[in-house]
Amino acid sequence: YVMRDRDFIERLIDRAKAAGCGALVITLDLQILGQRHKDIRNGLSTPPKPTLANLINLATKPRWIMGMAGTPRRKFGNIHGHVKGVTDMSNLGAWTADQFDPSLNWGDVEWIKKRWGGKIIIKGIMEPEDARLAVDSGADALVVSNHGGRQLDGAPSAIAALPGIVDAVGSQIEVHMDSGIRSGQDVLKAWALGARGTYIGRAFLWGLGAAGEAGVTKALQIIHKELDLTMAFCGHTRIETVDTGIFRPGTHPVA
Ligand SMILES: Cc1cc2nc3c(=O)[nH]c(=O)nc-3n(C[C@H](O)[C@H](O)[C@H](O)COP(=O)(O)O)c2cc1C
């Protein structure tokens, strides 16, 4: 995310460089936070409030509590210690909410690209027109994404937006996709429609919540196996040969 605090962003870019990151992802679809009705209804907050419902919920997760009690990693390491005044979860929450920058524009992307000097991936594209602007900005790849449906209620799905964007810019820039990838079959469908990379958000977090690092590995293994099996059932041994021919009439995810 590009935050109002550009000093922080500059230092973040420099830290990513020092850490040897191969590409920088700039998310362009969260300059304002969507209304997340479930979060409001569930009373989601940072840090969690000790409400009766939360306490009952926690009481049913003793293993998770033990794990959290024993870990030194209860903070956002990317931010904690790098921003003045952010010392705990409550002022982290307040800082973050205050930092999203509604004035973000393509000039900022240019500035970040210059400062970074490496590969840039633009995330949060849903329209061919914005995809063309991403190409003009000199980005190396873009991610077709509706932020996992967490921003604009009523936004089309990313898989529906994908073919139009691939048509518009697929020969000029690598097109990736996220939002709704739950299985290897989803990965293959996105590939068949022109995505050359897919990402997971919640599938990663579900694995993490269930079993930590091993759970994330397991989630990736499940997706990989499904991808492998689906390719085999579709008669392909190499992903490069997969195209829209894998869709039987009436099963095309977008038509
Ligand atoms: C809990 C949560 C936190 C997220 N935080 C960020 C974030 O900090 N930056 C960002 O670009 N996207 C963020 N996302 C969106 C994901 O990067 C991704 O676009 C989305 O989750 C993909 O959809 P999926 O969950 O259906 O796979 C977040 C998503 C979730 C569920």
Image (cartoon, rainbow, N blue to C red):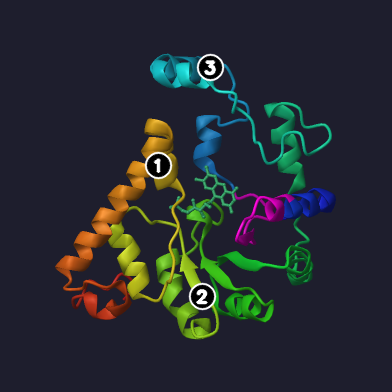
Q: Identify the secondary structure beneath mark 3.
A: helix
Give the residues in magenta: 15-34
Report which quarter residue 160 is drawn in: bottom left
- Mark 3 is surrounded, within 10 Å at the Cα level, by few (under 14), some (14 to 19) or many (20 or more) other residues, namely few
Does residue 80 lie above or below 131 as drawn?
A: above
- Mark 1 is surrounded, within 10 Å at the Cα level, by few (under 14), some (14 to 19) or many (20 or more) other residues, namely some
Report which quarter residue 36 is drawn in: top right
Marks 1/2: CA–CA distance:
26 Å
- Residue at point 57%, 16% (across, down): 50
Which dot marks residue 216? 1
Q: Identify the secondary structure beneath mark 1.
A: helix
Q: Which residue is mark 2?
A: 174
- Residue at point 71%, 52% (across, down): 18
Amino acid at dot 2: Glu
- Residue at point 75%, 57% (across, down): 102
Residue 43 versus residue 188: which sits nearer the camera? 188
At which x and y percent is residue 215? Answer: 37, 37
| Drawn side of residue 113 relative to residue 177, left or right | right
Which dot marks residue 114? none
Q: First in sequence: mark 3 or mark 2?
A: 3
Can you see residue 175? yes
Mark 1 vs ligand 1: CB below 8 Å: no
- Residue at point 34%, 45% (across, down): 219
Residue 36 versus residue 173: which sits nearer the camera? 173
Which dot marks residue 69? 3
Mark 3 vs ligand 1: CB below 8 Å: no
Marks 1/3: CA–CA distance:
21 Å
Mark 2 vs ligand 1: CB below 8 Å: no
At which x and y percent is residue 184? Answer: 30, 58
